[in-house]
Amino acid sequence: MSYIQFDKKHLVNLAYSLNKEVVRSNRSGAYASTTISGCNTRRYHGLLVAPQQNLPGVHVIISTLDETVVAGDATFDLGVHKYPDTYSPKGYKYLRDFVAQPVPKSTFRLGDVVLTKEKQLVDHENRTLVRYVLEEAKEPVKLRLRPFLAFRNVHKLAKANENVNKDYEHISQGAKLRIYDGYDDLYMQMSKEPEFIAKPDWYYSVEYIEDMEMGMDYQEDLYVPGYFEVSMQKGETVIFTAGPDEIKTANLLRMFNTQTRKRTERNSFENCLKVAATQFILTAKGKGKSRKNDRTDVIASYQLYRRGGRDAFIAIPGLTVANDDDKAFKALLDTMLKERKGPFFPFWEDSDSKATYEAMDAPLWFFWALQQYTQRTGDRAAVWKAYGKDMREILEAYRDGTDYNIKMQPNGLISGGEEGKALTWMNAFSEGKAVTPRMGMPVEINALWYNAVAFTLEIAGPRSTEGKKVIAEWTGVPEKIREAFVATFWDKRKAYLADVVNGEDKDWSVRPNQILAVSLPFSPLTDDMKTAVLEKVEKELLTPRGLRSLSPHDSRYEGKFAGTLDQRNKAFHQGMVWPWFTGHFVEALLKLKGRDALPQAYELYQGFEGVMREHGLSTISEVYEGEAPYNARGAVSQAWNVAEVIRMSKVIKVFDEVTQPLTL
């Protein structure tokens, strides 16, 4: 039996199967995603979702490819769409098996006919491949393939209109078309000569139930230009492909097999994490012979978000440790530095790929990521030579003052904030307002700040101009920060850290941010303080899926993630569980409790194996509800969650190895 597999009883139960999603990436910006039943439940689902040469953002090109099998006098429609008050067709009724590896494979039984379907994307090419094998049949059958086209930005929905270009052109074993100006041509071909029957039509009011539940627009009209038809005999294989150029169809089977051999099978928990990690790292070649425009990026999540600096720096260490890929680690750091503006890195990209820079913590996470890289390579001198200037300039900007009122205070701590902004990782907005604005001095910002200054002094090269300047200006500052940090955030009676301090106001909400003051390589706390913080976090925030964003004892706590988009945004940081904090919790746990904590650390890591078969298959979702059974919610695959679980595993194994008791 496959590691991730579902049988008939799961597949025909839509209440079960519609909550299981598959995401596959081409590792350069395109992806394919749907549910195991084949029914799209989000606007972000599609068979081919890809960047376009002349348009910003990412676009759903082919929403679905519906199959019809004609066997004798019987016709079987294998597609499935949600329409108002009904599902049609009901192809899920014919599903008998679904396996997730090495590529997603669905098996249909239609009376005496058994047909299998496998899907994958071509690495670094905006091309989808779908392979059909007629496993069982008493007589030849006809296979009809009907592409449902969207040609729209992933964040939007298509509507029937008169501007659609219905023209098409016959090409080798297929058809070429482009239904809207500005888009790349779409070449659809088959490995066997098909008949293309042009029958342009709109399919109205296709519904996406996940969007509907969030109170978003949820109905879309999809354009079908016609259908391809081929005959098949028992044992025969037919491959459909769609991409931005015409290919030799004689090579399709070899292409499919080559791509399959390149896949790492998701046949274990570790391999699932490894494959999930590689999907977040995107590489692209720049134009021209020079490699200075090459890019290596981290995508924050599928399907919802794109690039983000904070997410990237938190995720890079874990994503690259999966393959011990220090080269990719450096390439990712270098790509982010190309887009630095002052001390800031791109915070996020909107639907038009326009970057904003509203992240107070992203520059400080850069230091942590660089710290992890230095530990991996062991070459402080090389790191300082490559990044010392950037480190100095960021520290100076935060010290002297920069955008969003960010500035080092006389006591050495960092304060910042601006009305209408949410500058920390707790950045959800509801009804136009920041849910947790956290203006003033957030605890994790100052823990990261202390760590950044101390790390910079640790590796500053005393023989370089940059190093001499840093040593002269920053020696003694960590001690000043440490003293102020304790005086500002610590309360001996409460025995934990304030979450935000703004003037005389102290927010004593019990949140996971304080764990960073324990886990980071340089901590401003004494061991007794660290132990108290760890115990508080463990008691009120720890779950098998990570740390709650707010204690259940708080009156604002939300343990469930449901309702409209605004309602969900209110809950994001008021009780939802974030897996990425587990890496820092385990790191703190092992530092303070040593080998005695290894069983708990291993249990937390291995507990994530169960999520491989939930929500986003073979990956880790964005958030989990704060109450048992800790249901997965949000985006189905989140980079920093996958990365930190991988890094947590590495931290545990290294700690276990280096602390093995001597045997006589």
Image: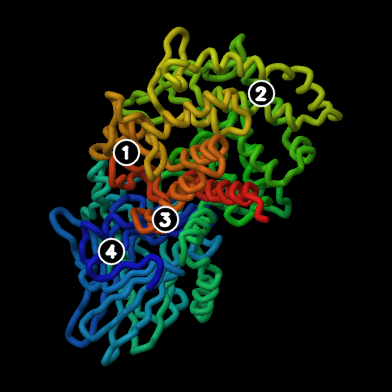
Instruction: Look at the numbered disc 2 and give the secondary structure of its residue.
Output: helix
Return the mark for residue 609. Answer: 3
Whole-angstrom CA distance, mark 3 to mark 2, is: 40 Å
Amino acid beneath label 2: Leu
Q: Give whichever of 223, 329 is nearer the camera.
A: 329
Q: Vertical placement of 214 versus 174: above or below?
A: above
Of circles 3 and 4, the one toward us is 3
User: What's the residue at 47%, 16% (across, down)?
Assistant: 492
Q: Are marks 1 and 2 in contact (CB under 8 Å)?
A: no
Amino acid beneath label 3: Glu
User: What's the residue at 51%, 14% (across, down)?
Assistant: 488
Q: Are marks 3 and 2 in contact (CB under 8 Å)?
A: no
181 displayed left or right of 203? right
Instruction: Look at the numbered disc 4 and give the secondary structure of its residue.
Output: loop
Q: Position of residue 506 (x, y in %)?
A: 43, 14
| 10 Å crowding of disc 3: few (<14), some (14-19), many (20+) | some
Mark sitting earlier along the chain (2/4): 4
262 displayed left or right of 459? left
Residue, disc 2: 395
Residue, disc 1: 626
Q: Are marks 4 and 1 in contact (CB under 8 Å)?
A: no
Q: Quadrant of the C terminus?
A: bottom right
| 10 Å crowding of disc 4: few (<14), some (14-19), many (20+) | many
Q: Are marks 2 and 4 in contact (CB under 8 Å)?
A: no
Q: Quadrant of the N terminus?
A: bottom left
Mark sitting earlier along the chain (3/4): 4
Whole-angstrom CA distance, mark 1 to mark 3, is: 18 Å
